[in-house]
């Protein structure tokens, strides 16, 4: 009589080689921030995700016209300590150093997370109130920050991850009754207009990144193209909530 195949028995007892990618932590995150993140695909759907070279760098952009003054928007973007409270895919944000003259952040810990994938960066931050720009450079490229820790396999998720927010005041932008304007930042840009170029600020977001492996690129492909639009939409909701709270406080 042939001995039982022990490897087969192990596989039958544990049919899933990887834990499910939808976790309770992710569910809690979605509930608390009131936005929906698409489900991660199963790793078994990728035939040959391993590549000796990282995928090429990517750039994602989103633009939206908002009926708020640029100084208010700039202060909200520069409040990096609060990023984890409202931005999707950012689970932790802690400013570790500030400019002695302006008080704006210069260094921060930023943790990027989605499902079981997570990595914490030491990010170099540049806030320019005159130009109305806020940038964060993270990763191993150029003068960007380094990686503090990663939980997505050897070497972390990204080669680098850079974000740049730019604000432009005025212009001939049409804004609808919800405060949104023409742009490519995840829609809701039609409706009854109430103003043209008065008190309107154009918000531009650029996200540049490079995954360290084709596997991570394949897993994140389900949400990759939506990242910039979701971030700028979450930012708009944050500004509106802060303004409502200010009005209630008197």
Image (spheres, grey):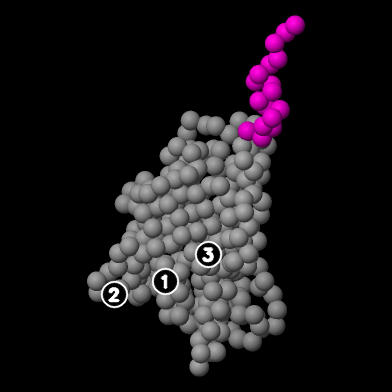
The answer to whether mark 3 and mark 1 are in CB contact below 8 A is no
Residue drawn at point x = 37 percent, y = 46 percent: 140
Q: Seen from this angle, which residue lies furthest bottom?
A: 250
Q: Which residues are magenta?
A: 1-17
Question: Real-space Cα distance between discs 2 and 1?
Answer: 13 Å
Tell me if residue 87 comes above or below residue 39 in the rendering. Answer: below
Left or right for 1, reference 102: right
Helix, strand or loop at label 1? It is loop
- Looking at marks 2 and 1 on the same chain, the residue that comes earlier in the sequence is marked by 1
Q: Secondary structure at mark 2?
A: loop
* Rendered location of residue 55, percent (x, y): 51, 40
* Residues at discs 2 and 1 in contact (Cβ within 8 Å): no
Q: Is residue 76 visible?
A: yes
In space, the residues marked 2 and 3 are separated at their CA atoms by 24 Å
Location of residue 42 with respect to 137 vertically, above or below: above
* Closer to the eye: label 2 or 3: 3
Left or right of 58 on screen, residue 100: left
Tag 1 residue: 79
Image disc number at residue 102: 2
- Residue at 47% x, 34% y: name it: 53
**Among the 4 quarters of the image, the one containing residue 7:** top right
Q: For mark 1, does the 10 Å Cα neighbourhood hold few (<14), some (14 to 19), or many (20 or more) residues?
A: few
- Which residue of the protein is positioned furthest toward the left in this rendering? 100
Q: Position of residue 20 (x, y in %)?
A: 64, 43
Lower position in the chain sequence, tag 2 or tag 3: 3
Relative to 97, residue 69 above or below: below
Mark carried by residue 90: none
Residue 118: x %, y % from top left: 50, 49
Residue 20 sits inside the magenta stretch: no
Q: Secondary structure at mark 3?
A: loop
């Amino acid at each position: 009589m042939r001995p039982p195949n022990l490897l087969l028995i192990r596989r039958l007892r544990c049919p899933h080689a990887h834990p499910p990618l939808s976790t309770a932590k992710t569910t809690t995150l979605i509930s608390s921030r009131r936005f929906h993140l698409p489900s991660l695909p199963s790793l078994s759907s990728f035939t040959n995700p391993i590549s000796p070279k990282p995928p090429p760098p990517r750039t994602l952009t989103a633009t939206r016209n908002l009926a708020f003054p640029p100084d208010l928007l700039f202060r909200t973007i520069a409040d990096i300590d609060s990023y984890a409270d409202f931005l999707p895919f950012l689970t932790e944000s802690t400013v570790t150093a500030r400019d002695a003259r302006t008080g704006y952040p210069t260094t921060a810990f930023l943790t990027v997370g989605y499902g079981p994938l997570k990595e914490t960066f030491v990010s170099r931050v540049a806030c320019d109130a005159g130009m109305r720009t806020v940038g964060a450079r993270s990763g191993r490229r150029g003068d960007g920050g380094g990686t503090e820790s990663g939980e997505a396999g050897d070497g972390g998720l990204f080669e680098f991850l850079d974000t740049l927010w730019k604000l432009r005041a005025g212009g001939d932008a049409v804004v609808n009754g919800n405060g949104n304007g023409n742009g490519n930042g995840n829609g809701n840009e039609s409706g009854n207009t109430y103003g043209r170029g008065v008190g309107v600020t154009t918000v531009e977001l650029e996200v540049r990144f490079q995954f360290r492996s084709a596997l991570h690129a394949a897993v994140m492909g389900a949400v990759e193209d939506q990242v910039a639009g979701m971030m700028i939409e979450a930012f708009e909701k944050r500004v509106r909530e802060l303004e409502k709270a200010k009005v209630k406080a008197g």
